[in-house]
Amino acid sequence: MTSTSAPCRLVQVPAVSADAAYTTDAAAATAATPPHPSAGHPSPDPWRDCLAAALAARGCIPDAAQQRALTRLALLAAAVAGCVESAPGAAGPRGLFLWGGVGRGKTLLVDLLAASLPPGTVLRRHQHAFLADLHRAIAAAREGGADDAFAQAVDDLLAGARLLVLDEFHAHDIADALILGRALAAIHAAGAALVFTANHPPAELWPDTAFHQAQADRYQPVADFIARHCDLLEVDGGQDYRLQGAAAAPRWWVGATAAEGDTALADWLGLPFGGRAGDAAGAASKGVANPGGEKLILAGRPIPVRARAGAGEGGLWFDFAALCGSPRSPGDYLALALQAPRLAISDVPRFGPRDGDALRRFIWLIDAAYEAGVALAATATSPWDELLDGAPDLARLLGRDLRRCASRLAEMTRRSPRVPDRAGSRGA
C-alpha cells in the first residue's frame, strides 16, 4: 500500500480498500460525489472542487497528469451544465479525448464527471455497449417505420443528454468504425459534447497490421472528426494504479490439478461441491441451481454452466472452452456479465498461433465483466502475463488489448463482487 505522503500519485489511503478506491461502478462514483454545482454556473471552479472532493472521498490523490485532466473536465462540466437549456441543435461544447496507458485513472475520472452533472445530462457507455444499444435502437426505429432510422436511433439513445462519454474507445473493426463515425457526427450535430477514453491517440486507434493499414482510409475519418471536435489530452503518469497497493493474492490459480482447481473455485463461490453433476449433494441448501446441468442461452446459443451460486452474492462458473471456444459477440458477454456478480472460469489455456478467435473473445469477456464490476477467479495453465508466450504473432497483433486485459485481470481477481441489485447501473 502506498503512503499518502507520496507526491503526485493517485494512491490508496489506509482507510479505503483497493476495491473502494478503484472500482469503476458508476453508482459508487455517484455515492462518492458531492451534490453537483448549480446548473448554468459560468465558472468551472465549483466543478473542479466537486471532482477533487470526490477523489479525496475515495482516498485518491491525483498525479500531475490527472490534475490536468481534472481542470479540463471541470471546464467541460461547466460548459455542458451551462448549455443544458440551450435550444435543440445549438453547437455543443468542444469535447475531450483522454488517452494513456492502462490503469491510469481515465475511467475513474470520466465516471466522476458523469456523476457531477445533473441527472439526464450524460449518456455514459463502454464502446461495446454503445454499439449494441445503437444496433437495437436502429432495429426498433425501422420496425416503427421511421423515415430515417439511423437519425431516430441516435435521438432515442441520447434522450436529451448533452454529453456522450465513450469509455475504451477503439476502431479495430471496419464496420464498427464506419457506424461510429456516422453516429458521432449525428451526436455532435445534435449539440451534444463528446468525451472519450482510450489507450492510444486517435491516429493510432487501429492495429498496426498490414490488413488494417491497407484499410486506413476507412478509419481516418473517425480520427479526423475527433481531432476537429475534441481536445486531445494524454493521461499517463507512468503507473498502472490497478496494480498499486494490491496486497491480496490474485484468484488466478496456476498449475493446480483439476480437483484442486475445482475445489478452489467452488470454495470461492461458496459451493459445497466441485461443480460437477455427480457432486451435487447439499447443493440446494446452498442456493445452487442445476449444478453441472444448466445451459445459459445468449443470442440463441447455449453455454454449458458448471454451476450457479444463487445464494448471497451469486455467481456463475464456466469452463473456458464453453465461454470462448465458439462464436460469440461482445454483446453476448455484456449480457452475461450483468447476470454474474462473481465469475469463475476453469482451464484458461496458454494460447497458440491458431487461437486468435478464442483470445479475442476472452478479451471481450474481460472488458465486459470489468465494466460491470464483476469479481473473477480462474484456474489457468500459465500466469496471465505468459498466456501468449507460444504465440508471438498474436501478441504483436493484440498487444495493446492484452495490456489492458492483464491490468484488468489484476484488479478483477482481487476485487469484491458488486452488489447484485446494482447490475446495469452503469451509464446512468
Image (cartoon, helix red, strand yellow):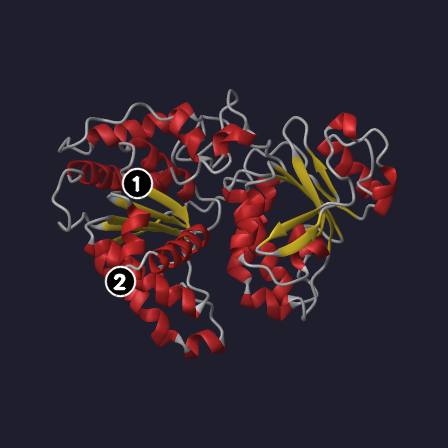
- Could you tell me if residue 2 is visible in this image? no
Q: Where is residue 301 in the image (x, y as percent from the top left)?
A: 63, 57
- The residue mark sitting in front, 2 or 1, is 2
The residue at the point 15 percent across, 32 percent down is 40
Query: Mark 2 or mark 1: which comes first in sequence?
Result: 1
Image coordinates of residue 82 in percent, x first then y, are 15, 37
Q: Are marks 2 and 1 in contact (CB under 8 Å)?
A: no
Label 1 packing within 10 angstroms: few (<14), some (14-19), many (20+): many
Q: Position of residue 215 (x, y in %)?
A: 41, 77
Instruction: Give the amino acid type for the residue marked by disc 1 in the picture.
Output: Val
Does 308 sit left or right of 226 as displayed?
A: right
Marks 2 and 1, Cα distance to the nearest angstrom? Answer: 24 Å
Residue with the mark numbered 2: 148
**Can you see residue 234?**
yes
Q: From what the image shows, is residue 165 above or below residue 349? A: above
The image position of residue 111, as x and y in percent, is 38, 38
Q: Mark 1 sits on what residue?
A: 122
Residue 216 vertical position relative to residue 125 in the rendered view, above or below:
below
Q: In which quarter of the image is residue 266?
A: top right
* Residue plotted at (25% across, 58% down): 186
* Residue 225 falls in image quadrant: bottom left
Three-letter code, disc 2 = Asp
Q: Is mark 2 on a helix, strand or loop?
A: loop
Q: Which of 27 and 354 is in front in this view?
A: 27
**Left or right of residue 415: residue 135:** left
Task: Look at the numbered disc 1 and give the secondary structure of its residue.
Answer: strand
Nearer to the camera, 14 or 200 = 200
